[in-house]
Structure formats: structure tokens, C-alpha cells
């Protein structure tokens, strides 16, 4: 009985260690988030699709986007710069990570000035051994009234 308990505890410890090892740390997931923004800014659809799931959903001021709309909108953006700050991430599952942060960007969308600071959130999921964004939202901060 003592051996069975010992083996059970060891198995539980090993399983927990493996689970934690699969979830990237805050810095690693921030690099993925930054890479997704950079590929969007660079209008690199191929690089973007390496970071974002084919079944992606985005929720924005102008509506809900699936992957094709996101790629179409990418071509309408002229993003000059972006800067991520206040980055945070958490996970209570080994295959899902939620990130929240602000991004200050300079640029236009279809010729309209979109410069400002946005509150953002992304859900990342482990798919076939890769972390892919499956959901994203951003809301432009409004000036204090």
C-alpha cells in the first residue's frame, strides 16, 4: 500500500510538472503577441496565419471578424508603429492562456486616423503543439471626461 501511495504521488508530481512546463511564461507569450502585431503591421498574411488559428474570432468596435475579414482589414491598415505595455497573462489550463495589455499605435485604417491607446485581450490555445491566438479584442481608450 505504501508503494502504491508513493507511485501515485510521484505520478501526480510528474504530471503537474509536465503540465506547467507546457505553458509558456509571460515573456514567451508576450513575444508571440508582439509577433502577431508585427506581422499585421507588416501586412504579412503568411506570418500572421502562423500565429493565429484558422477559426479565429475578433470582436471590435465595427463588428465581429473571422480570419478572412482580419486578413482583408490588414490590407486597409497603414500602421506606422505600435507599442505594447501593461502586459499580463494568466492560465488555469495547460492549453489556454489569456493576455491583457494596452497598445499605443500610430496609423490609419482606410485613410482614417486610428492613432491612440487601446485596451486589448487575446486568448491563446495550444493547437498541434503550437500556441495560436483564437480570440482577440481591442477597444480604444476614451479621453477622461
Image (cartoon, grey):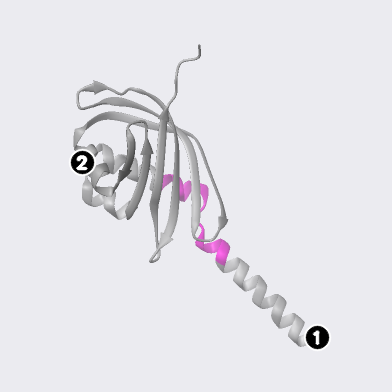
Mark 2 vs 1, N-terminal side? 1
Q: Is residue 126 above or below residue 135?
A: below
- Identify the element where label 2 is drawn: helix
Residue farthest toward the top in the current orientation of the protein: 145
Looking at the picture, how far across and down is residue 59, in whole percent? 38, 39
Looking at the picture, how far across and down is residue 27, in whole percent? 48, 47
- Identify the element where label 1 is drawn: helix
Say which residue label 1 marks.
2
Q: Kindly check if marks 2 and 1 are in contact, taking CB atoms under 8 A apart as contact.
A: no
From the viewer's perspective, tell me whether residue 140 is left or right of residue 62.
right
Would you say residue 9 is visible in this rendering? yes
Looking at the picture, how far across and down is residue 12, in whole percent? 66, 73
Residue 58: name its quadrant.
top left
Residue drawn at 27 percent across, 40 percent down? 40
Residue farthest toward the right in the current orientation of the protein: 2
Label number found at residue 59:
none
Toward the viewer: 78 or 80?
78
Would you say residue 52 is visible in this rendering? no
Residue drawn at 51 percent across, 58 percent down? 23
Say which residue label 2 marks.
72
Q: Is 20 contained in the magenta span?
A: yes
Q: CA distance from mark 2 to mark 1?
A: 62 Å
From the viewer's perspective, tell me whether residue 117 is left or right of residue 70.
right
Q: Of the residues tagged 2 and 1, which is closer to the observer?
A: 2
Residue drawn at 20 percent across, 23 percent down? 111
Pointer 2: residues within 10 angstroms few (<14), some, or many (20+)? few
Mainly helix, strand or loop, the magenta region? helix
Toward the viewer: 9 or 137?
137
Q: Is residue 123 above or below residue 107?
A: below
Amino acid at each position: 500500500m505504501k508503494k502504491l501511495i508513493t507511485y501515485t504521488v510521484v505520478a501526480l508530481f510528474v504530471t503537474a510538472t509536465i503540465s506547467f512546463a507546457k505553458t509558456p511564461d509571460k515573456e514567451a507569450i508576450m513575444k508571440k503577441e508582439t509577433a502577431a502585431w508585427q506581422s499585421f503591421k507588416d501586412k504579412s498574411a503568411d506570418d500572421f496565419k502562423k500565429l493565429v488559428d484558422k477559426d479565429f474570432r475578433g470582436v471590435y468596435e465595427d463588428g465581429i471578424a473571422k480570419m478572412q475579414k482580419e486578413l482583408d482589414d490588414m490590407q486597409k491598415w497603414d500602421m506606422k508603429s505600435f507599442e505594447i505595455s501593461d502586459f499580463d497573462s494568466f492560465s488555469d489550463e495547460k492549453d489556454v492562456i489569456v493576455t491583457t495589455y494596452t497598445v499605443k499605435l500610430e496609423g490609419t485604417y482606410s485613410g482614417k486616423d486610428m492613432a491612440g491607446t487601446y485596451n486589448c485581450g487575446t486568448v491563446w490555445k495550444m493547437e498541434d503543439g503550437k500556441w495560436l491566438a483564437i480570440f482577440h479584442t481591442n477597444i480604444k481608450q476614451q479621453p477622461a471626461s
